[in-house]
Amino acid sequence: MAIEKHNNIYRSRISVLIILFILFVVLLTFVPNYKHGNLYTLAIPLSIVSFVFLILASIKYKIANDKLLIKVLFITMDSIPIDQISSIRRSYNPLSSPASSLKRLAVYRQKRREELIALISPIREKEFIEELLKKNSSIKVDVKSDDGKWNPLNYDI
């Protein structure tokens, strides 16, 4: 039985900094109140951390039927027609968005008279952008590589 490869589905990059931040907040919140020997006091923070990690790991971006679908778990959070995308730029904006990393792509689109932005963080950025450009060659791309002396391994922030 052959395994079907989904080239048009891109998982979100998961940042080590976001994971450390979540663990730090949970530790600061629940550890001071931990009573030795009481497992119920550990069940709440472990449940919260597990749920948050499930959400972060389930973020996907799918290119299908000339639309970019942003999905979290089984819910489609946004459906962006690819012909409305005007540009893609690098962003480190920490605003809440369906992205598990601070290394993001800002996808700009025109909808009526306003410009909307979706902040996403696909793990295979170059392939993702190339696939969008195949469907809409007029997208302006301004995504610089982060390789350099401060990021020798292209490490995610």
Image (cartoon, rainbow, N blue to C red):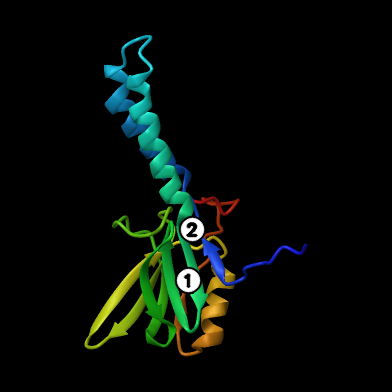
Residue neighbourhood size for the residue with mark 2, other residues' Cα within 10 Å, grouped as few (<14), some (14–19), many (≥20): many
Specify whether 60 is left or right of 45: right
Which labelled disc corresponds to residue 12?
2
Give how far across and how far down residue 8 sits, in percent.
57, 72
Identify whether 40 is placed above or below 75. above
Residue that appears at 53% across and 83% down: 133
The location of residue 26, given as percent across then percent down, is 33, 31
Q: Mark 1 and mark 2 in contact? Answer it, CB < 8 Å.
A: no
Say which mark, if any, is on residue 143.
Answer: 1
Point out residue 129 in the picture as x, y percentages from the top left corner: 53, 75
Along the viewing direction, whichever of 134 and 103 lies nearer the viewer: 134
Q: How many numbered marks have been drawn onto this rendered protein structure?
A: 2
Question: Would you say residue 25 is visible in this rendering?
Answer: yes
Circle 1 — which element? loop
Q: Amino acid at mark 2?
A: Ser
Q: CA distance from mark 1 to mark 2?
A: 17 Å
Q: Is residue 5 above or below residue 79?
A: above
Query: Which picture quadrant has residue 93?
Result: bottom left
Q: Describe the element under mark 2 as helix, strand or loop.
A: loop
- What is the number of the mark on residue 109? none
Q: Earlier in the sequence, mark 1 or mark 2?
A: 2
Q: Residue furthest top?
A: 36
User: For the residue carrying disc 1, how many other residues have a C-alpha within 10 Å: few (<14), some (14-19), or many (20+)?
Assistant: some
Question: Which residue is pictured at 36% across the width and 32% down the height?
Answer: 24
Vertical arrangement, residue 128 with respect to residue 85, above or below: above
Residue 52 location, x and y as percent? Answer: 39, 43
Left or right: residue 113 versus residue 41 is left
- Judged by depth in the image, the label closer to the viewer, 1 or 2, is 2
Three-letter amino acid code at the position of disc 1: Val
